[in-house]
């Protein structure tokens, strides 16, 4: 999933760094990322801890959580962790829309976390 999403983002002209685990991501030094995507498989998943770490340590970098709908429901009380939510499985146009909205929010406001964006998968 990470490689596919990374490939789609690269095809949109973005520079992409892929970390396939929270351990790998924890040794990665945050730089000038425009948007960070974190895949989460549940509220107790290490991706949730990574999102929390990013929010505390790199608060101005927009975060998009990528997870299924059941995980989203379970994480509803943790919405402060993300600026966007991309529901698995997603289509390329949903990824494009999510990136566009989150990037625009980040550019328009230094407090971009006041609004949330969602790109739900089709029924």
Image (spheres, grey):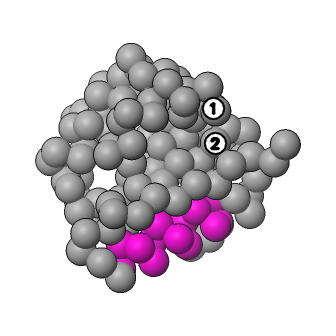
Circles 2 and 1 in contact, beta carbons < 8 Å: yes
Count of marks, rendered view? 2
Q: Where is residue 60 in the image (x, y as percent from the top left)?
A: 23, 63
Disc 2 to disc 1, C-alpha distance: 5 Å
Residue at 64% of width from left, 66% of height from top?
96
Residue 88 relative to residue 27: left or right: right
Residue beneath disc 2: 87
Q: Residue furthest right?
A: 123
Residue beneath disc 1: 68
Q: In which quarter of the image is residue 83?
A: bottom left
Residue in the foreground of this view, choosing between 75 and 9 = 75
Is 101 rendered above or below residue 1?
below
The magenta region covers 95-107
Q: In which quarter of the image is residue 72?
A: top right
Q: Does the magenta stretch include residue 101?
A: yes
Q: Is residue 89 visible?
A: yes
């Amino acid at each position: 999933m990470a490689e596919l999403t990374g490939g789609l983002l690269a095809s949109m002209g973005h520079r992409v760094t892929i970390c396939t685990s929270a351990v790998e991501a924890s040794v990665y030094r945050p730089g000038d990322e425009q948007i960070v995507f974190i895949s989460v498989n549940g509220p107790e998943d290490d991706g949730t801890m990574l999102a929390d770490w990013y929010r505390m340590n790199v608060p101005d970098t927009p975060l998009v959580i990528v997870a299924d709908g059941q995980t989203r429901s379970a994480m509803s009380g943790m919405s402060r962790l993300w600026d966007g939510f991309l529901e698995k499985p997603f289509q390329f146009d949903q990824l494009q829309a999510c990136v566009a909205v989150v990037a625009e929010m980040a550019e328009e406001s230094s407090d971009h976390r006041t609004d949330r964006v969602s790109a739900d998968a089709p029924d």
